[in-house]
Amino acid sequence: MIKANRIIGHYEGQEEGPLFICLGAMHGNEPAGVRAIELVVKMLEVEPIRNPHFRYRGNFVGLVGNLKAYEEGKRYLDKDLNRSFDADKLSFLETQDPQELDNEDREFLELDREVRVLIAQYQPSKVILLDLHTTSSHGGIFTICREREEDIELGAAMHAPIVLGMLSGLKGTTLHYFTTENMGVETIPITFESGQHVEGLSVTRAVAGIINCMKAIDSVDSDVVENHHEEILIKYSESLPRVTRLIERHAIAENDAFVMKPGFLNFQSVAKGEVVATDKNGPVTVSENGRLLMPLYQLQGEDGFFLVKEVT
Ligand SMILES: [Zn+2]
């Protein structure tokens, strides 16, 4: 077991700008985002030495999402934290003895408090919250964003395929919770999936995602900080659909005995009726022609797979 701090690192810019909060290990078995944040903080620290004209506009802070699960290397301890963000439940949880709460309710409270402290200290006019994830399956980087023009523009600037409609298929994610309404300041949440959990390149692609996001929100000029990041993501997304929309979520319960057939990749095309998994009732098929997303190749998780369809 490792010992970690909630704050991975931070960099306060020379000029005013947005508060850019980057979350790693919202799922404790996804360390790539934490590594990427550590690297980005180091890069920002050396950039003024490399380039005396360097200016960062705003404040960059990296936080661990599910600290206890990350320390234990598990997706979660009691329940999925990225399904547990619930504004209606917050005031109730705050009245409870923290020791009596399950791990993820406690993590929710702590993370929420940390984000509010950052907002209160920095007093930004805008908050960008980038939630970094990886998948148990290979093949495919993508962003998940809300269906607002500004959010989609930000997603597109990150040069990864955009998946729409995920919010209606899920509840209690960072995208549902870290909003202008709940934070009291203009807030844009966005999720970036950088590849498979333990693939080395997932760290590189997460670094690229963070840097591209910094450029898109105008915290750094596009000609500073190592410039190959855009290319990494553009090249990797070349064969992937630009915008897709969720058409099916295959939810699973613990006693379903769900087993994904081996070898499926993110964005792999599948045909209506194709058998993609088995469970206690036999073969599991897809309901329409489409592309598979996040086929489950790990023990913990409530989603067997998602099916998306190309929009453009
Ligand atoms: Zn995740």
Image (tube, rainbow, N blue to C red):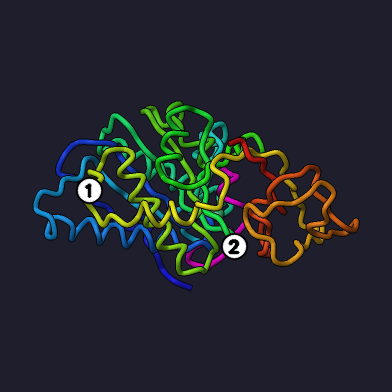
User: Magenta residues, as a range?
Assistant: 70-84
Task: Give the residue at mark 2.
Answer: 138
At a point 49% along the width and 39% down the height, the residue shown is 94
Task: Check the image and name the residue furthest to the left.
Answer: 52
Residue placed most toward the observer, 28 or 276: 276
At a point 52% along the width and 49% down the height, the residue shown is 142
User: What amino acid type should be assigned to the residue bearing mark 1?
Assistant: Asp
Compared to residue 245, the image places residue 67 above or below, namely below
At a point 29% along the width and 47% down the height, the residue shown is 60
Compared to residue 40, the image places residue 182 above or below, namely above
User: What amino acid type should be assigned to the residue bearing mark 2?
Assistant: His
Q: Residues within 10 Å of mark 2 (few under 14, many from 20)?
A: many
Residue 57 lies in the magenta-colored region: no
**Element class at badge 1:** loop
Measured as percent of width and height from the top left, residue 244 is found at 60, 40
Residue placed most toward the observer, 222 or 66: 222
Compared to residue 96, the image places residue 296 above or below, namely below
